[in-house]
Image: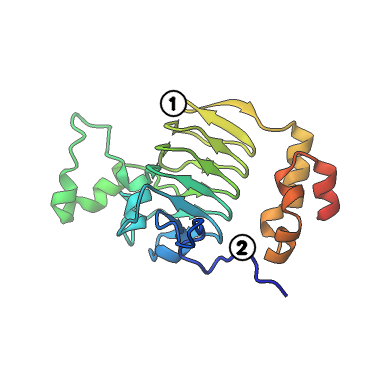
Amino acid sequence: MTRPFLDSGLRHPIVLPDGTPHEGTVHLNRVIDHPNITVGDFSYYSGLGACDDYAAEIAPYLYPGAPERLRIGRFCQIASGTRIITSSANHAMGGFSTFPFAVFRQELIGSYAAEIGDQRDTHIANDVWLGFESVVMPGVRIGNGVIVAARAVVTSDVPDYAVVAGNPGRVVRMRFPPEIVLRLLGIAWWNWEVRKIERHVKAITSADINALQRAA
């Protein structure tokens, strides 16, 4: 039996023509050990070089023990410079100043946490492409198969298989008609076992829904 070319156990999933791994590309669940971050298999970050702390690289304001979580699904593609701004980055905005005094005086932190409101989790589903230097704002839910354009700022939830661009990000088009999206969500190829995915890569990367349905 041949060795799978999809190997979720690898730190660096891309091998260059000279046989060396591309050190800027990493499977995120092999390099992130953070109690508030969950990443599915095969989701990767591709930067311009190696990084010492990938959790801080992609979610710089999410500290261990924060009230919110970041959840990333399987087979996501996260480009260099992408930042996911989680809810703990918010400042209270109801008063005359937004300066976070409580951060510097811990006995005030309880009331301050209440002031900044709902600490919603951030969810990024499966097979999502976050383009170069894109930004995901706090509490956003991004659906399956979404494409986020380079330098887009995603400020609100995004439906499955949408393309988002701009600042603030807006849906510029849907990748497929609604009936195709429903079938894709029912197929959910990202949940298949690895050997099955490898056998049917052509169907997965095609635009032939009937071929993919037969593979499923």
Q: Regarding mark 2 in the picture, which secondary structure is present there?
A: loop
Q: Which residue is painted at 29% across and 42% down in the image?
A: 115
Position in image of residue 177 (x %, y %): 75, 31
Whether residue 33 appears in this view of the structure is yes
Q: Which residue is painted at 41% across and 38% down in the image?
A: 137
133 relative position to 94: left or right: right
Whether residue 59 appears in this view of the structure is no
Position in image of residue 55 (x %, y %): 36, 56
Q: Which residue is painted at 56% across and 45% down in the image?
A: 128
Q: Which residue is labeled 2 in the image? A: 6
Position in image of residue 176 (x %, y %): 71, 33
Q: Quadrant of residue 190?
A: bottom right
Dot 1 amino acid type: Pro
106 relative position to 177: left or right: left
- Find the residue positioned furthest to the front: 18
Do the residues under discs 2 and 1 have CB atoms within 8 angstroms?
Answer: no
Q: Which residue is labeled 1 in the image? A: 168
Q: Which residue is painted at 40% across and 60% down in the image?
A: 36
3 relative position to 34: left or right: right
